[in-house]
Image (cartoon, rainbow, N blue to C red):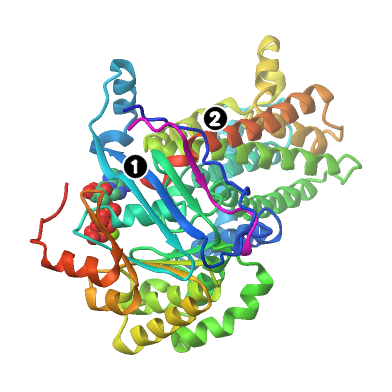
Amino acid sequence: MSNGSLSLSLPASSGLDAGRGGGNLLFLLQNLVLKDFRIRYRNMSLGVLWSFANPLVMMGILTFVFTRIYPNPAVPNFAVFILCGLVPFNFYSLSLNAGTTSLLDNQSLVKRVRCPRRIFPIAAVLANCLHFLIQIALLIAFVLAFGYRVNRFWPWLGVVWMLEIIFMSGLSLMTSVLDVYYRDVRYLVEASNAVMFWLVPIFYSLEMVPQRLRLLYLLNPIAAVVVAGRDVLLHGKPPAPALLVPMALVSVGCLALGLVVFGRLERNIADNL
Amino acid sequence: MSRSIATQPAIGNDLADPAPSAGHAVLRFEAVSKTYAHNAARTLLRRGMLSWLTRSRTSVFYALREVSFELHAAASLAVVGANGAGKSTLLRCATGISAPDSGRVEVRGTIAALMELGAGFHPDLTGAENVMLNASLLGLTRRKTCEQFDRIVEFSGLADFIHEPLRTYSSGMVLRLAFSVAVRVDPDILVIDEMLSVGDIEFQEKCVGEIKRLKQGGKTLICVAHDLKLLRNLCDRALWLEHGRVRMFGPCSEVVDAYEAAPAPGVSD
Ligand SMILES: Nc1ncnc2c1ncn2[C@@H]1O[C@H](COP(=O)(O)OP(=O)(O)OP(=O)(O)O)[C@@H](O)[C@H]1O
Ligand SMILES: [Mg+2]
């Protein structure tokens, strides 16, 4: 029975599916993002406050360690300096964890309805943008409280943060579909989060990294977001092209790769959930 | 047999006539086979690497084997068979939730499916939120969903519970909500997998009425149930699956009679 010809023709251009990819895909995305919010905040009595708690506690501990135990006089205002590193890193780790498990978390939907599955990891990343925004607000409050001023380079922050969201979407597309086939992937991702904490210049600055390794550092978009954030917020200078170009290339490339990998492996998702 | 793990199923828009009209096959299975690997540890990386290194093939199990049939618009198909015969697998292939390993599935028109135990609901969301989510999953636009919302709630008879989380619903209540959404998205093909049995008599009658109305409107129904009386009432064609193969396909009463007369084969494996 070697019937090679295999094709599943489903209507793409009729009735319900009319406009898929347009307005109602957006409606679906919106519903999925809303669902994530609702589920998360309904089960937490402190709700959004948690988004403040985590970076504040981490900031406090790291500031204590690096001003009292390993003092680092080269960096003024260590608390803000740390927060500039923690906020992009937190978004990275939270959205990657949520994105990786998104297909399994939504299996009651994925297994029963035919819909574009790549929407699930992307919705998980976007749902985490609320945390990201709250933490950004916290960061900006600290920056202003420490006496830094708004400068004309601040719009660059929007660009680098958007690139981080793109990067995370690409990464989550890959890890989510791999996690369906190999459930170990989520543990690998958790382990890699811990590694990433050290590889991103959170409690040290890029200048402390040996010169020949810096280029390697900047290939990591999360590290680049941290460095760009400090440049703009603390040093009042625009992010260097040497920073932006690799970050943009890696982020967009990652999204493209994520879409390709997801498309390749999407076929048997429902059978393996 | 050569298992062709082909690329993405071609989402064909080569179907010139999306609106099904009588005489056209709305659903066609051509020698469809679906296999599952039979090893529980397949999701472990270690196992994956081992089998990749040793190139060992895991034992393959046919859930559907060379299934062919054709269904015309306004027909209604009952699928019967023992537990594990492949009925749900057949419906998953028809809806595009799973892809067959070989063969061809052709669908003309849109499908809404009430698969076993739920139709794409999230337990932590309220009924109302699930209606929105489910309708958007089925491809409805925001405007249409809002237009239909009140009618969906009214048909379900759940107005008092619509803001309660779905996990507090009884299975019959879940069915009510799922069925109400599914008929409101107005699919060309409605697929029901063992859902109707949990509805009470009143709602089952409502469902039967609604299904008959859909059929009159030229829509197609595919129904899996172990309640043969219900199937006789609803369906005009029937497909009997045994160990993933088509044992019989024909007029509903004939097939169901034969199925009833056959000695129970037990769970197929
Ligand atoms: N995702 C899966 N992975 C592995 N095996 C599967 C999977 N889904 C189904 N099977 C196997 O395929 C066979 C057919 O399953 P299916 O759910 O289609 O049975 P069914 O006819 O719907 O039975 P029931 O009457 O109990 O609902 C079963 O033997 C089952 O073990
Ligand atoms: Mg079944």
Left or right? Give the position of A97 relative to B101.
right
- Chain hosting mark 2: A
Question: Which of A217/B61 is in front?
Answer: B61
Seen at 57% across and 26% down, the residue is A70
Question: Which of B132/A158 is in front?
Answer: B132
SS at badge 1: strand
Above-or-below relation of B246 to A227: below
Above-or-below relation of B260 to A255: below
Seen at 33% across and 52% down, the residue is B89
Residues drawn in magenta: A1-15
Chief secondary structure of the magenta portion: loop
Q: Position of residue A154 (x, y in %)?
A: 85, 43
**Real-space Cα separation, disc 2 to disc 1, in angstroms:** 45 Å
Q: Residue furthest left?
A: B263
Q: Position of residue B135 (x, y in %)?
A: 55, 68
Q: Which residue is mark 1?
A: B33
Above-or-below relation of A188 to B28: above
Q: Residue furthest right?
A: A152
- Chain hosting mark 1: B
